[in-house]
Image (spheres, rainbow, N blue to C red):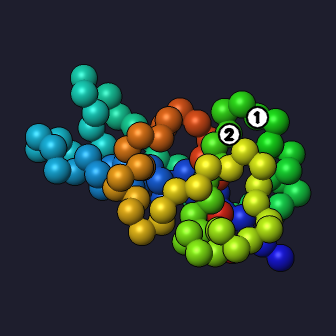
């Protein structure tokens, strides 16, 4: 059975990690002194994800390595595949207003 993970908190932490190199701001600060709330990642069952698939605010990210992704016949329709070993190259470009679900098998 394929395990699904909701990665909102994980990706939010990655965004914060990518931005830690700039300008002496504390980890919770953004431009204009606004604070960003970070949610903790939770696991969801496949049935729950199935019920979320029609949500236009949902972004599904497949984090399998290229070899496993290329060999697999099982992929979630509409999922984007990103290289899990090169997160800094793509994480900052994700729409942070979306509900982000990550999965790997």
Q: Which mark is drawn over residue 41? A: none
Q: Residue furthest top?
A: 32
C-alpha gap between disc 1 and disc 2: 6 Å
Please identify the quadrant where the C terminus is shown.
Answer: bottom right
- The image quarter in which residue 102 lies: bottom right
In this orientation, does residue 81 appear?
Answer: yes
- Where is the N terminus found, in terms of image quarters? bottom right
Total marks shown come to: 2
Task: Please say if 39 is above or below 103.
Answer: above
Viewer-closest of 65 and 31: 65
Q: Which mark is residue 58?
A: 2
Image point 24% across, 23% down: which residue? 32
User: Label 1: how many residues lie within 10 Å, few (<14), some (14-19) or many (20+)?
Assistant: few
Residue at (41% x, 49% y) in the render: 90
The image position of residue 4, as x and y in percent, is: 72, 64
In the image: residue 78, left or right of residue 62:
right
Residue identifier under label 1: 55
Query: Do tag 1 and tag 2 residues touch (Cβ < 8 Å)?
Result: yes
* 68 is higher (above) or lower (below) than 62: below
**Residue 26 rendering spot, x and y as whole percentages:** 21, 45
The answer to which quarter of the image holds residue 104 is: bottom right
Residue 42 location in percent, x, y? 64, 60
Mark 2 lies on a secondary structure that is strand
| As drawn, 75 above or below 23 | below
Q: For mark 2, does the 10 Å Cα neighbourhood hold few (<14), some (14 to 19), or many (20 or more) residues?
A: some
Q: Along the line of sight, which residue is nearer the eye, 65 or 101?
A: 65
Secondary structure of the residue carrying tag 1 is: loop
User: Residue sitting at 47 percent across and 41 percent down?
Assistant: 94
Q: Position of residue 21 (x, y in %)?
A: 17, 50
Q: Residue furthest left?
A: 24
């Amino acid at each position: 059975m394929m395990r699904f993970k909701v990665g909102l908190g994980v990706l939010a932490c990655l965004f914060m990690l990518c931005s830690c190199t700039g300008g002496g701001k504390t980890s919770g600060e953004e431009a204009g002194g606004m604070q960003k709330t970070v949610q903790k990642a939770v696991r969801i069952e496949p049935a729950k994800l199935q019920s979320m698939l029609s949500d236009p605010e949902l972004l599904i990210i497949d984090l399998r390595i290229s070899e496993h992704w290329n060999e697999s016949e099982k992929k979630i329709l509409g999922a984007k595949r990103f290289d899990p070993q090169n997160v800094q190259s793509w994480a900052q470009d994700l729409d942070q207003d979306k509900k982000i679900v990550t999965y790997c098998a």
